[in-house]
Image: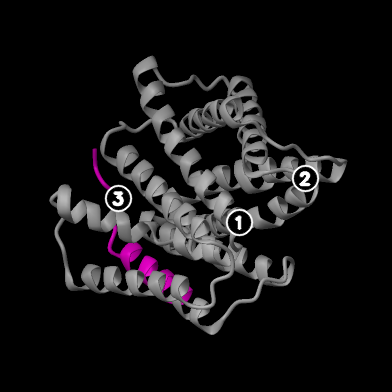
Amino acid sequence: MQTSYIPSHQQEYTRGFILVLLAAFSYGLQPFFAYFAYQAGADPIGLLFARFSLAAILLLLWLKKRKISLPTPKLFAQTLLIGIGYAGAALGYYSASHSASVSLAVILMFSFPAFVTLYSILFLAEKSSWSKIFSLVLASSGVLLATGMDFHGDMAGIFWALFAALSYGSAILYGTHKVPPQNPMASAGVILVGGAVTFSVALMLQGADWPQSASGWFAILGLALFATILPIATFISGSPRIGASDAATLSTLEPIVAVAIAVILIEESLSLTMLTGGTMVIIAAVILSKGKRPVKR
């Protein structure tokens, strides 16, 4: 029994490792699809409305086919709020990458673990440690270094990216401490609905620009399928196999893929100071994720 259990455990971990790695890589593909959608004439609101709406419809149809029920009304409303937070993060991230640079947007967006940790220490009575303090200082220094040197674009891009980090961190905090556990895929479906509702309101208030070619719409379809639904499914399936800490650490592949796409495809220039600042932010995120353990609720 002992000899057969260990390989089985190793296989499960390896499978989870590959799935979470695939999720991080897929999330990192967002600038690739967004680039072609923008080239076809779309703006962030039009792009994100189409992305969330299409992804929500496809995932809800899959849930119906698998006969997976949606949460109860109260839990549905709570999860919808998480979706609104994620939508705010997406709006900030895509607006920053559209007006400034993808590289800077990714670096600032990925400072959200520092915000979550700082808030948890100050307001949720989470114990501090030297590693957490070091990580917070490292992340803050990295953000200042990345934004203070060789920045092309306007200050609005910086604020949009920081707004994305704040929104994403707030959604994580609310979901972790206020929303009871539920079926992960059903939760993902409601979160996508929350994003679609948010951008429906934005569409009515501000309007949107749509892709003017078939290639632009294919880019949005690719964004919904390969950079939204696929990573959601693979992360939800893989993370329980390897644990929250290792899953969070592997997720740091996402900004590396996104920045690589920006440099190779979009031909963005990546200065030494921005590269150094981004590395500091990612290292801080890895240290913080290593200190996390699953929360029993």
- Residue at image coords 42%, 50%: 163
| One can see residue 102 in this view | yes
Q: Residues within 10 Å of mark 1 (few under 14, many from 20)?
A: some
Name above or below for residue 215 compared with residue 135: above
Image x and y of residue 165, in percent: 42, 53
Q: CA distance from mark 3 to mark 2?
A: 43 Å
Quarter assignment of residue 244? bottom left
Identified by mark 3, the residue type is Pro
Q: Which residue is mark 1?
A: 99
Span shown in magenta: 278-297
Image x and y of residue 70, in percent: 48, 20
The residue furthest bottom is 272
Q: Is residue 214 magenta?
A: no
- Residue at image coords 69%, 51%: 34
Left or right: where 42 falls relative to 284 = right
Pick whichever of labels 3 and 2 is earlier in the sequence: 2
Say which mark, if any, is on residue 165.
none
| One can see residue 7 in this view | no
Image x and y of residue 242, in percent: 43, 56
Q: Which residue is mark 3?
A: 294
Pick whichever of labels 1 and 2 is earlier in the sequence: 2
Say which mark, if any, is on residue 41.
2
The residue furthest front is 154
Identified by mark 1, the residue type is Ser
Q: Nearer the viewer, residue 94 or 3?
A: 94
Image x and y of residue 95, in percent: 57, 50
Q: CA distance from mark 3 to mark 1?
A: 37 Å
